Image: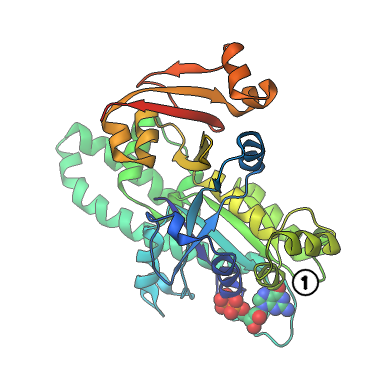
Amino acid sequence: ALTAGIVGLPNVGKSTLFNAITQAGAESANYPFCTIDPNVGIVEVPDQRLYKLSDMYQPKKTIPTAFEFTDIAGIVKGASKGEGLGNQFLSHIRQVDAICHVVRCFQDENITHVSGQVDPISDIETINLELILADLDTVTKRMQRVEKMAKQKDKEAVAEFEVLSKLKEAFEEEKPARAVSFSEDEEKLVKGLHLLTSKPVLYVANVGEDELLDADANENVQKVKDFAAKDEAEVIVVSAKVESEIAELDGEEKEAFLEELGIAESGLDQLIKATYQLLGLGTYFTAGEQEVRAWTFQKGIKAPKAAGIIHSDFEKGFIRAETVSYDDLMEAGSEHTAKENGNVRLEGKEYIVKDGDVMHFRFNV
Ligand code: GDP
């Protein structure tokens, strides 16, 4: 399963945020495929559509879908040179599919900042530089191996050497790999390098609890937003402290508290949704009298593979999928009417599943 890693310098609020994630905790019994690891938090994906479907079908059970955040502690300046938990940190980052980079924007004299003052851009650059240096190392080593073959005009080696040179140049200008544009073929080579700075990133601006309502008045948040815009990355504003309080509340209490704060959606919920997008994940639904359930799939997969997420037998014996889009189903008001309207399609093995599809799989056992 795809996972997003939470990174940031010490004392920026990572643990507080991660605790909120585990507190909000999904019932892991529903998600046997998820990892049981103290550094992994399972979050349910907030999705209004699931509850609308549940209203329509009135099932016995309604189950949201979930995915994982991994807490990656221990980055300090010099990590790429093995400082602190450097190497361990980098190998953990290598295993995640997207990065949520937490940045301290709150002021609090009681909480020490590693470099002496709150300066989000310098913080971001410190971490990004460590990742770039680690990638530079990867690329340089690879170049040494490919160079000889490239000199002998081996076609593949020449192509790879070119890609590596392009990357090296970017890293030397302190640019991440994701900022470099490549052709489709080159992209494949880059993928094979498993670079840290190829991973998609979003920034999490951690503000003081009294700043949530007007976060843009916090000049550090503005700075992070300007920086992220250049990186084409999204910024989510949270107050980790508030999130840890919200995480202790259940449904109605939570809504009342949010209303009191004057915010429509908790920072954590925003973060979960944005990260889901960042990971390239989508949701399809299964719906019936017994159960209405949301399932996570990687965008771009075909129907049999999507069926396999529920059970491997569904994939092996896949025949076809009765499919209706969420919007069509809602407009029709019931599955029966949707069928009469001709909105329920019979899709085969080549069908590429879309976010919001409501599916019944037919399969041979
Ligand atoms: P980590 O080292 O990045 O994991 O940081 P922690 O989550 O341990 O937070 C460091 C300290 O900052 C703790 O004492 C937190 O209570 C505090 N902290 C975290 N978020 C906030 C916040 O939004 N406002 C204030 N005032 N303190 C915070």
- The part of the image, by quadrant, that contains residue 227 is bottom right
Ligand 1 occupies quarter: bottom right
Q: How is the image coloured?
A: rainbow
Label 1: which residue? Answer: 209
The foreground one among 333 and 64 is 333
Q: Quadrant of residue 339?
A: top right
From the viewer's perspective, is 73 left or right of 107? left
181 w.r.t. 137: above or below: above
In this orientation, does residue 118 appear? no
Which residue sits at x=14%, y=37%?
152
From the viewer's perspective, tell me whether residue 13 is left or right of residue 140.
right
* Residue 278 position in % (x across, y down): 54, 46
Viewer can see residue 127 = yes
Cβ of disc 1 within 8 Å of ligand 1?
Answer: yes
Residue appearing at x 43%, y 55% in the figure: 31
Task: Give the SS element for disc 1.
Answer: loop
> Front-most of 98 and 355?
355
Residue at image location 70% in from the left, 63% down from the top: 238
Task: Give the vertical position of 343 relative to 227 (above or below).
Answer: above
Q: Is residue 279 left or right of residue 315?
A: right
Question: Across the whole image, how many numbered discs are drawn on residues?
Answer: 1
Of all residues shown, which one is farthest toward the bottom? 110
**15 vs 110: above or below:** above
Q: Position of residue 216 (x, y in %)?
A: 81, 58
